[in-house]
């Protein structure tokens, strides 16, 4: 097994100190890097084990950050906005570009998939992967979390998400619509959080779409009876996507 160097950094963005981590396998080049965008309330530490496995299998560098309100980020979740979190994602992308990484793949899960879609409108990407992708109302983009639907009743949030179609005016859908690279949309078959209409809307607007279904999988495999089996399936798909993108 080859060694993987791990580097921890803090991105300073006008009073927004954002922790991020870079994983660099010994044989990795600067040709490609994966920007791994995890789901809502997930952290760097919670995803490190899986990233190490995928970095090892693909000889590819990975980067991950703790968005505002997540992990050891000093800003509280109630005060964080999606606009701020996107600025942090763009900031880490720019740090990777400064370090010489030529092509960046954005792989996002749930909230992170929403961030990956938005990033496609802000910076060049080699590929975007939207797994169990969330979507949010544009009118909440600048609101602190405590004022959003997500912080209130699940019913109100789900009512808006359940109404989403490919024709819904939305920044994330528009970003995917304009993206000229390959888009991979991954649906979790038994997702009780994200209505299947949401991943299908992303798929419908993409120029070069690919659709994958993880059978029998709920939104968060870690809450299922056999999480390791589902994570293994997901990671195999992602490793294949990375390898094919690099080929």
Image (spheres, grey):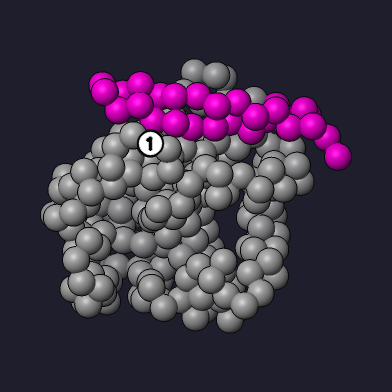
Quick one: label 1, few (<14), some, or many (20+) residues within 10 Å? some
Give percent across and percent down for residue 200.
40, 71
Residue with the mark numbered 1: 73
Residue plotted at (57% across, 75% down)? 224
Instruction: Note whether 136 is above or below 67 in the view shown.
Output: below
Residue 194, image quadrant: bottom left
Residue plotted at (47% across, 57% down)? 109
- Magenta stretch: give its range: 1-29
- Can you see residue 244? no
Q: Quadrant of the N terminus?
A: top right
Residue 99, image quadrant: top right
Give percent across and percent down for residue 127.
52, 46
Give percent across and percent down for residue 55.
69, 41
Q: Main secondary structure of the magenta part?
A: strand
Compared across the picture, whether 240 is left or right of 76 comes to right
Badge 1 marks a residue whose secondary structure is: loop
- Can you see residue 66? yes
Instruction: Note whether 211 is above or below 215 in the view shown.
Output: above
Instruction: Note whether 213 is above or below 134 in the view shown.
Output: below
Compare residues 174 and 189 and report the one nearer the observer.
Answer: 189
Compared across the picture, whether 91 is left or right of 33 comes to left
Instruction: Note whether 177 is above or below 93 in the view shown.
Output: below
Residue 173, image quadrant: bottom left
Compare residues 84 and 153 and report the one nearer the observer.
Answer: 153
Tally of marks? 1
- 17 falls in the magenta region: yes
């Amino acid at each position: 097994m080859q060694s993987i160097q791990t580097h921890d950094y803090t991105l300073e963005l006008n009073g927004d100190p954002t922790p991020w981590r870079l994983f660099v396998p010994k044989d990795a080049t600067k040709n490609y890097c994966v920007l791994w965008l995890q789901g809502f309330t997930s952290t760097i530490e919670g995803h490190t084990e899986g990233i190490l496995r995928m970095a090892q299998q693909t000889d590819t560098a990975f980067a991950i950050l703790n968005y505002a309100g997540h992990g050891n980020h000093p800003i509280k979740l109630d005060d964080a906005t999606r606009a701020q979190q996107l600025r942090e994602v763009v900031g880490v992308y720019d740090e990777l570009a400064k370090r010489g990484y030529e092509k960046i793949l954005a792989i996002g899960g749930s909230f992170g998939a929403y961030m990956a879609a938005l990033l496609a409108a802000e910076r060049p990407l080699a590929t975007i992967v939207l797994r169990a992708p969330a979507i949010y109302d544009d009118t909440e983009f600048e609101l602190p979390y405590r004022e959003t639907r997500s912080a209130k009743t699940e019913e109100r949030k789900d009512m808006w998400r359940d109404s989403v179609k490919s024709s819904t005016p939305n920044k994330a859908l528009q970003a995917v619509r304009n993206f000229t690279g390959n888009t991979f949309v991954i649906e979790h078959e038994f997702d009780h959080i994200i209505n299947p209409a949401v991943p299908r809307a992303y798929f419908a607007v993409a120029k070069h779409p690919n659709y994958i279904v993880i059978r029998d999988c709920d939104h968060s495999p870690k809450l299922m009876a056999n999480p390791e089996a589902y994570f293994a399936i997901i990671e195999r798909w992602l490793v294949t996507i990375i390898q094919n993108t690099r080929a």
